[in-house]
Amino acid sequence: AFVIRNANGQTHETVVYWSDGKHEPAVDYDGRREKESGQPWCSFYVQWSSSGAYLATMIPSKGVVLWGGANYEKLGKFRAPGVEVVNFSPNEKFFLTSNNNRNDPEAVKIFSIETGKLLRAFPLFPKNFFPDDMTTQEKSQIPPPLFQWSYDDKYVARMGKDLISIYDMSTMKLLDSRSLVADNIREFQFSPNANILAYWAPELKNSPAHVDLIELPSRKKLRQKNLFNVTKCSMVWQNEGTYLGVKVTRHTKSKKTLFNNLELFRIEDQGIPVEMLDIKDAVMAFAWEPNGSRFAMIHAENPTSTKVDVSFYDMKKVTTVTKNKKTETNISNEVNLVETLAGKQVNTLFWSPAGQHIIMASLGDSSSGGLEFYDVKNKSLAVKEHYRANQVMWDPSGRTVATVVSQPIAGGHYKYSMDNGYMLWTFQGNKLHQASFEHFYQFQWRPRKSLLSKSEKKTVIKNLKKYEKIFAKDDKEFLRSRELENTKAKRALRSDFRERLARLKDIRRQQKETRMALYDGYDSEDESNYILKETFVETILSTKEEVV
């Protein structure tokens, strides 16, 4: 299922669709009850909860409304005037709202979904966040530090000046009544699968830049990696928390030349070893394969190059050794290059949630909207295009992907409004559906968690051929039923024609004696009354002369 926000003229619509990747999307709910009663269903953006149990609709004049159940019943109303952002916790116990008002002491609010109560409110920026000598104009250019949830809903945290404030959700007070000291911190992220916090800080006085991994609630430092001549770092967790990738932008001593390298942390290995991958090119994008050990990156000698390379690496190296006519497969923890695709015109990477498939896209106003659907395992490539697309979103199963041309919902003129809308594709790059709108603001898939454990998934993959036969049979029956449904009208017309033809033939047969009497006994249907002549005509189509 997915939800869209669009408008034609002055009429704004919020519609939830059901899509199975085989039929045209069907309306699941469009707020008809609210329209009939004159109540607003949504007047800003919408947001699904982490596992799709709730749909939050934003009404800035009032706050947030939660909907759920098969019929999208209203489950709760939460007062948050001016709301522009809703962010659910991973286990759907809490959510926070923000109105992005820098002068509101309660700009950020955290609510309990179960009780409906406001647990705590915060200003948009922490206390003493800005340096004393910073001007108002300079402050306005700095975005507010975002609150982040721990994977198990136990903590919510926000970066401050030289610290990270970690709040215990059971009390909404600082963990151990104090913030975590992190001198000169620039960014932090929670692990998606453990209470581990990663942050990086640039060089300070005689101390080098460093990436730290901190365990909570003990605050134990699990690993620290020192870095030198650092301009910037970007951290990316693998979705299972097995690996952490840090893209490091470094400079020479003169600071005139920049270059990149990747610091790759193996979180589950003893001592958390770190491997450095030195990249001579500028790295423009980096993305982990979900539930896997591979990663992809876009790189080029010049960061402004239109032609780039896309390289795929694996954190595990597989080697085969043959001994005594027996082949053994060995897997070692070693980063190795899988392949490089050269000369691509792309700027973003989107892995399928199921892994193996990736979309290499060219997005943005100055880009063509090119889409390259690539199967990393089978090396197959399909090149498509969605002109002026600015978003690519996979559905949770990885079977369908949406490409979107959207515009901001609040004010401003969007010069490419005629291209607004979305397209649905299969993971192989076959177009399933296209919809266009005068104004298109939002597209969002409904999340859902897998019902199978990791071991159960491995069992399914192991017995895939067995399941393929079952699914092939089901697909065949489905296609047959769909074909029967699609040809129902044609079959009815054909049956009607055959019945009419049989009826007319019967009438003609009954009129035979009357017809022969009018022709003085001549039977026009008797073949013996006809003389059959055969005539052959030969036509020369071409001639060819050969001199012997």
Image (tube, rainbow, N blue to C red):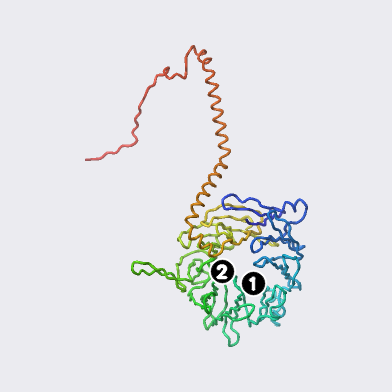
Q: Nearer the viewer, residue 256 or 472?
A: 472
Residue at which label 2 appears: 240
Q: Residue at x 54, y 27 (%)?
A: 501
Pinpoint residue 258: horizontal percent, then vertical percent.
52, 77
The amino acid at mark 2 is: Glu
Residue at which label 1 appears: 150
- Vertical position of residue 478 compared to residue 407: above or below: above
Residue 360 appears in the rendering: no
Q: Could you tell me which quadrant the C terminus lies in? A: top left
Q: Nearer the viewer, residue 72 or 56?
A: 72
Q: Nearer the viewer, residue 64 or 228?
A: 64
Q: Quadrant of residue 75?
A: bottom right
Label tally: 2
- Vertical position of residue 123 compared to residue 354: above or below: below
- Element type at mark 2: loop
- Vertical position of residue 301 compared to residue 373: above or below: below
Pinpoint residue 382: horizontal percent, then vertical percent.
49, 57
Q: Residue at x 53, y 44 (%)?
A: 480
